[in-house]
Image: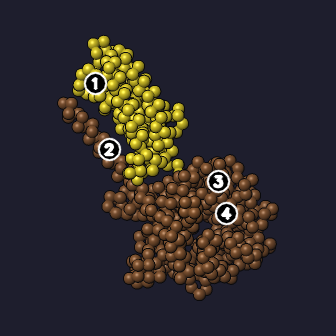
Chain colours: A brown, B yellow
Amino acid sequence: MFRRRLALHLSVLIVGAAVIRVGVTPAEVCPPIDGASVSRAIDEAVRWIVTGMGPEGRYTYGYHRGEDRVNPGYNGPRHAGVTMSLYQAHAFTGSSEALAGADRALGFALQGMFTHGDFVAWDVLGEVNTGANGLLLAALAIRREATGDPRHDELMRGIGRFLLIQQYPDGSVSGYWHRSTGTSDPIFGTYSTGEASWALALLDHAFPGEGWGEAAARTVDYMATDRDRREGRLTRLPDHWAAYTISELRPDLLTDERMDYARQLAGYFGMRLRFEAQRRGDGINLALRWFPGPPAGVGTAGEGIGALWAIGDDPRLADLQPNIEERMLCTAGFMAQRQVSASEAADALRPDLQRGAWFYRGYTQMDDQQHVLSSLLYALTLIESREDGR
Amino acid sequence: MSGLLLVVAFMAAINPLRSRIALPEDGRGRVRPAAIAVAFAVSLGAIALLGWWSAPILGALEVTPETFRIAAGLVTILAGAWAFAIPTPAAEPELGGWRDGLWPIAFPRLLAPEVLMLAFAGATQNGVAATAGAAAAALAVFGLVGAMPTGGRTIRVFAAAGRVLAVLLVLVGIFLMIDGIRDV
């Protein structure tokens, strides 16, 4: 009797542990990574973006390798976002290839600029999108910071004034502006709010004392408090652009409430990246965790947590730094491993559209490379600081 | 998790009142002191040992402490629901004398899955000493309850109070899950 009961209880423990292991806590696989590997992954991603550019300065939007089909669509915010990421690559690594590619893409955007009253905005393919303008301004600000070239200063201020037009008094941001009516459209874009606020925070760095930072902070407060309820979301939006914004706010604007929001964001990104590290895409793991996630989604979490790492010297985030660094390194490890290498692409139909890319179920899109590239840039900085310290 | 919450968590997981029900007793309706002492020592030792090994074990399993807290929360919620639904645990065969402290008191009664999970989760977040201290407090309460003679009415009171602790255990599990999800 005793033995039967003992066996029963031990069986429950063992079976329960196995179920928990497989279903709830699969291994979070973090391949080892070093600076050279991350640099290579960054160079390859830049190469994919720049090699796929057309003569007019547009990027290859997307490619399905199974069908050998290029996606002919295009999208303003993504154009600006990829351009911004290339400027980041130049700023972090000094890549001349990234700078040259970004400048060509900037040339495409500059053709669509128009002036209305005292502001300047980008009309991309017939749509005046706040997010696209925000990311274009962010790209210009990062370019200015990295190159010291002031040639676009007035354009930057002009786009900044457009973003202020789009900003409501409570900090919320209209997603679109109509050229025909000359009015803001009372529709919110999912990410354009954070994109606009980040651009304003960067503008404050470029031109301090002009009030851009206060405007950015107003939108951070809106994102931290009312946004999700007002914009009809049931859960908090894990907004990496909000993380970027907080990381760029002046120290005197980093109130406790805004830093609390930064902590919340770090939690969302951390959870996303831990979950991603559990994904292997085969066997029972595939049934329970599905395929390794879309690279753009993983990359946004990676760059968001990277942006927060960059302000880790603030004592209000200091206790999170060890975990943040662990997630950054882990993400860099598995994303470098998931990138299509030159040898893997060598036998492909179009090697240039595969090499350096991250695919999700056979498809890659320009923003996949953008977001992962940005996340790797922060990881590289972390790894290099550790390698230098050794 | 604060130190106070850790004590509450172990109190709810060990659930001294429910755990006291249907244990081997001496002729006066009390659990034998030697058995209680053995159960206390073995349970506390096991919890401390698991806590001590929690970091290397989780490292070997490639599980972050934050993700483990989600699993611990899930197990704790299920255990709390089970204890609420079945307030009187089944009687187990006795080994007799002090050996009752090993079976069925230490295992399976005290070292239940939710207690083992809490030992891991608590040690990785609060340290081994704090975890062992919290567990010791709950085990001490179990020791006091074990020394009390039980009758028909006492059992009913223990079962009812045990259900309250079971609800508390569910709340602890929810807290652990949210904490694990929100942590970096």
Whether labels 3 and 4 share one chain: yes
Visible in this render: residue B133? yes
Q: Which image quarter holds the C terminus of chain A? A: bottom right
Q: Are marks 4 and 1 on the same chain?
A: no
Q: Specify the label residue A16 is tagged with.
A: 2
Residue placed under numbered mark 4 in the picture: A198
Disc 4: host chain: A
Q: Residue at x 51, y 56 (%)?
A: A326
What amino acid is found at the position of numbered circle 2 in the picture?
Answer: Gly
| Amino acid type shown at disc 1 | Asp
| Residue placed under numbered mark 3 in the picture | A313
**Is disc 2 surrounded by few (<14), some (14 to 19) or many (20+) residues within 10 Å?**
few
Mark 2 element type: helix
Distance, label 4 to label 1, CA atoms, is 65 Å
Residue B63 image point, x, y percent: 42, 51
Task: Tell which residue pokes out farthest to the front in this image.
Answer: A390
